[in-house]
Image (tube, rainbow, N blue to C red):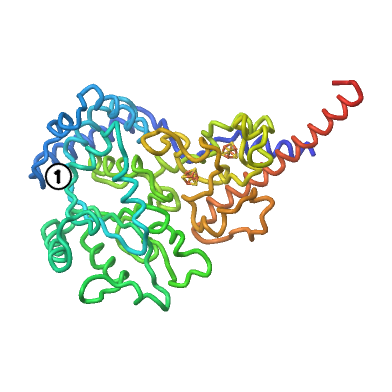
Amino acid sequence: MAERIDGVRKLFTSKSARVDTNRGDLYYQQLFDTCRARLDALREQPAVNRLDFDSLLTDEGQDRREFMKWVSAVTAMLMLPPMFTPLVAEAAELMNRLPVVWLELQDCAGNSEALLRSDGPKIDEIVLDIISLEFHESLMAPSGHQAEKQLEDAMEHFKGNYLLFVEGSIPVGAGRDWCTIGASGETFLDHLNRVAENAAAVVAVGACATFGGIPAAAPNPTGAVGVMDVVKGKPVINIPACPANPANMVGVVLHYALTGQVPELDSLLRPKFAFGYRIHDNCERRAHFDAGEYVEEWGDEGAKNNFCLYKMGCKGPMTFNNCSIVRYNEGVNWPIGVGRGCIGCSEPDFWDKYAYERPMANANIKAPTGGVEKTVDQFGLGLLTAAGIGIGIHAVASAVAGKREEGGEG
Ligand code: SF4
Ligand code: SF4
């Protein structure tokens, strides 16, 4: 038993060890110089649209002070020290040098919706407004051949320089021809590969574009896969979740503007600044988990007291994402905040493995093994086992306490 308790203590006290937030003065000075040079080069480039950042701020009723507050928060989110704040502000202002092409494939448009539906304080929106969105089928006015021409022109004009955002999975199974695009009937697979060929980098947004999402849930009739399974020879950045958090999309674009490089990624190609911690690490209900206080059924006293949702199926202990910090709907709230456990939407195969109304320890789910999942899932499973043991220890402790009370020792 002592060995097990030691094991639990080790797992719960060890740092996630996934994000290195202090790399030393020399590292940051070199990075600062790289960013300075990148921004100077970006400033020399012609703007690809005529939008002016300051005018947009004024039009949206924002002042410079609000903008600088936002910049400080984003600098911290990107895990950069405060010395980078002026550079991040400059990167935001130079966004009109960045051409973006956005493709929608096998999807529900939820990620586009998440972006469009964001409301105040508006700074994220302004930053995204100023990007030169060269092609987005759902948002642009032209359609049909005109839209196709716009895409061809953008690919030609910004060859090698545009960021390609992809929303939705790619059907590659026997039914891949079920999903075609345009008058020529080009398959999603061919379309994606053709547009990705001349992109500077490909950003997969949402659960479907990253790991296949709901279209890839068993029995996966279309053989849906994510972007990284088909696009080769290009940097791919995954921003999973259902939908992807707009704050993380803005973070990736800002990082690219600032450094000209993709951010540091984990083994699943997710930016570490956003996916370097588990939901559980920063959850507001964590104290209840540690105290062994759980919601046992919907609507019980535990639920009324905001106890931990682990026993109701929360997958926060094995899910890497920053929702517990940045939240959704402009930071107003998030799933666990409103009393619903995390269903692990930023993990591969979340629909089959995690969207289950019981703790993983009680679910009849085969342990995932091998492949790219190994690191993250084994880590998650390790914690899960520990969580199971933790609950077990708490149960024993409660039973002992109960006996003491019965026996008048309490
Ligand atoms: S199990 Fe879920 S609700 Fe409980 S502390 Fe962890 S993340 Fe929060
Ligand atoms: S709390 Fe979990 S399920 Fe909800 S959005 Fe975040 S990662 Fe996805």
Q: Position of residue 83 (x, y in %)?
A: 28, 25
Q: Residue at x 59, y 53 (%)?
A: 356
Q: Residue at x 43, y 61 (%)?
A: 212
Pick the quarter of the image with the C terminus. top right
Q: Amino acid at mark 1?
A: Arg
Kindly indicate the quadrant of the structure image that contains residue 91.
Answer: top left
Q: How many marks?
A: 1
Residue ranking furthest to the front: 299
Residue ranking furthest to the right: 407
Name the foreground residue: 109 vs 75. 109
Q: Is mark 1 within 8 Å of ligand 2?
A: no
Q: Position of residue 338 (x, y in %)?
A: 51, 37
How crowded pointer 1 is (Cα within 10 Å; few <14, some 14-19, many 20+) is rated as many
Relative to 343, does residue 16 appear above or below in the rendering?
above
What secondary structure is found at the residue carrying circle 1? Answer: helix
Kindly indicate the quadrant of the structure image that contains residue 406.
Answer: top right
Left or right position of 68 against 153: right
Left or right position of 358 against 241: right
Q: Position of residue 68 (x, y in %)?
A: 25, 25
Name the foreground residue: 59 vs 65. 59
Q: Position of residue 382 (x, y in %)?
A: 63, 47
